[in-house]
Each structure stands twice: as C-alpha cells, then as structure tokens.
Amino acid sequence: MEVYRRYKGTVKPACGILFERGPQYRVQGPNVPATTRQRKQSFIRRLIIPVVALSVLTYFGFHALNGELGLVGRARIEHQFDDLEKQLEVLVAERKALVAKVSLLRPESLNPDMVDERARLNLNLVHGDELVILRPGNSYQKIN
C-alpha cells in the first residue's frame, strides 16, 4: 500500500504511517520530523538572561567609571602626575644648585671664598676681628 500526502497542491508519495486530523493528512515516519510538545515558560526563566546581562553590564559600567583606570581613576592619575612633575622641578633645581657648589670646590676651579665659607661652617671658626651675633633659640657651641 502506498501512502500519499498533499504538498502545495501536488500529490507526492511518502513513506510512513498516515494520520488523519481535519482536512489535512499528516505523515509520520523516518524522513519526517516528529512534533514536540512545548511547555509554557515560567516567569522566572524568562528573567534569568536579562538579569545576568544587566548584572554584567552594571559590573563593567561601574569599573569603567570608578576603577583604577576608569574616568575617576584617570583624573586621580593626572592629578598625581601634576604633583610629581612639580616635585621633579624642585628636585632638578636643587640638584643644579648642588652641582654648581660642588664644581666650585674642585681643585681646578677652587674658589678661596667658598673654601673659607665651608671651613667656618663646619669647624665653627671665626677671625679675631669679626663680630658674631648669636640668635636666641639656637644651640651654639663655645667658640674659642
């Protein structure tokens, strides 16, 4: 026995079992997929993917603003950069002053006034004809 089914106005042979439902015939067999029973999705299952996506988006959005390299963090880094540049300028000026003083103490360019100043400062020496003014609040050693 050969089974036929309707297919867009033409009759084609089909293999399998013939079921009758209303005016149309439906064939079920190895070449025809079986129908599946669909269940109504619960309200919670519909919210799982949007809630997870929103959580991930919130996490990355928060860290894009407040993270170490975010918008607020970038302003903090720029402020810190400006402070460090100011400190660098002060240290470079101080280093240049020290290099200039050291260059005056080298044997090839020895400045007698600089040697005298350093000796008086380090050894607490004064000449006999000089006047020494002691300021209150400073601790002084006895000068001979």
Image (cartoon, rainbow, N blue to C red):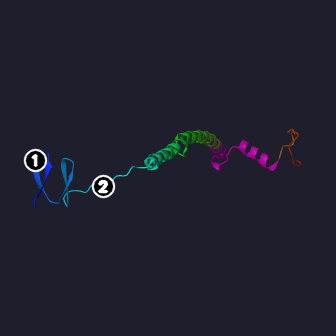
Most frequent secondary structure within the magenta stretch: helix
The percent position of residue 62, horizontal first and vertical second, equals 53, 43
Compare marks 1 and 2 and give the one earlier in the sequence.
1
- Mark 2: give few (<14), some (14-19) or many (20+) Cα within 10 Å: few
The disc at residue 87 is none
Left/right of residue 45 with respect to residue 90 in the rendered view: left
Q: Is residue 4 magenta?
A: no
Left of 117 or right of it: where is 102?
left
Q: Amino acid at mark 2?
A: Thr
Side (left or right) of 11 relative to 60: left
Q: Please state the extent of the stretch shown in magenta in the rendering.
A: 95-124
Front position in the image: 65 or 99: 65
Residue flagged by tag 1: what amino acid is it? Thr
Question: With respect to residue 22, does 131 lie above or below?
Answer: above
Q: Residues within 10 Å of mark 1 (few under 14, many from 20)?
A: few
Q: Which mark is residue 10?
A: 1
Residue drawn at (21%, 48%), measured in percent from left and top? Answer: 22
Residue 11 position within the rendered picture, expressed as x and y whole percent measured from the top left: 10, 50
Quadrant housing the N terminus: bottom left
Q: Which residue is mark 2?
A: 36
Considering the numbered disc 1 on the image, is that residue within a helix, a strand or a loop? strand
The answer to which of 26 and 83 lies nearer the viewer is: 26
Residue 89 location (% of width, % of height): 61, 40
Is 107 contained in the magenta span?
yes
